[in-house]
Image (tube, rainbow, N blue to C red):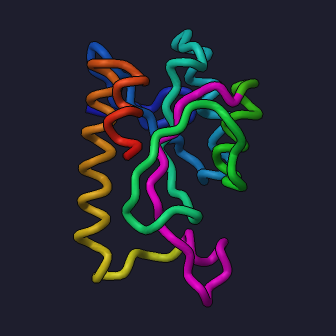
Amino acid sequence: MSRKVAGCVVGETASALLAKPDTFMNLSGGPVAALMKKRNIPPENLVVVHDDLDMEFGKLRLKWDGGDGGHKGVRSVAEHVGTSQFLRVKIGIGRDPVAPPDEYVLSRFKPTEADALAEALDRAVEALGVLIAEGRERAMNLFNR
């Protein structure tokens, strides 16, 4: 069951809190930081799942710390949280050679991408499970191949 907390739709288990900010991704830093403050969650326990234009469609990569890679949502989170030291689960969406990036990221997936997208999301869920059960290093070692 989900509910609203600090501008996010939240689902919770004993070991994890899953939150989807109730705003555009580019403005998600405020709600994420507010939820972290309300729940006393340190930045090192934050995981941001997001798309990545510069990765092949369907590819998955876990990344700790570093820059935002031009992703305005990741930049917003880092600015509001006050650090870039959090984990990112990046899911590649590739680039459209014709559409401008801001149009492309807001467009719907093509029917031909459905299977690859489902596989990528399944791998992301599996990676999050390993992250929770076995830690960041193990998850990164298994899924960054």
Q: Which corner quadrant of the image does residue 28 belong to?
A: top right
- Residue 94 on the magenta segment: yes
Q: Where does the image place residue 94, in percent across and percent down from the top left?
A: 51, 70
Q: Along the line of sight, which residue is nearer the eye, 78 or 142?
A: 142
Residue most toward the top?
Answer: 40
Residue at the image point whose x is 45% and y is 47% from the top = 61
Q: Which corner quadrant of the image does residue 102 belong to?
A: bottom right
Residue most toward the bottom?
Answer: 98
- Residue 26 lies left or right of residue 5; in this view the side is right
- Residue 13 lies left or right of residue 9; in this view the side is left
Residue at the image point whose x is 43% and y is 75% from the top = 108
Residue at the image point whose x is 51% and y is 56% from the top = 51
Q: Where does the image place residue 73, in percent across and percent down from the top left?
A: 65, 48
Q: Along the line of sight, which residue is nearer the eye, 61 or 117?
A: 61
- Residue 138 on the magenta segment: no
Q: Along the line of sight, which residue is nearer the eye, 68 or 109?
A: 68
- How many numbered dots are placed on residues in this image? 0
- Residue 24 lies left or right of residue 142; in this view the side is right
Q: Please give the range of residues in magenta.
A: 84-106
Q: Is residue 127 above or below residue 15?
A: below
Q: Is residue 58 above or below residue 124?
A: below
Residue at the image point whose x is 69% and y is 26% from the top = 81
Q: Where does the image place residue 79, in percent across and percent down from the top left?
A: 76, 34
The quarter in which the N terminus is drawn is top left
Q: Where does the image place residue 121, in percent across and percent down from the top left?
A: 30, 53
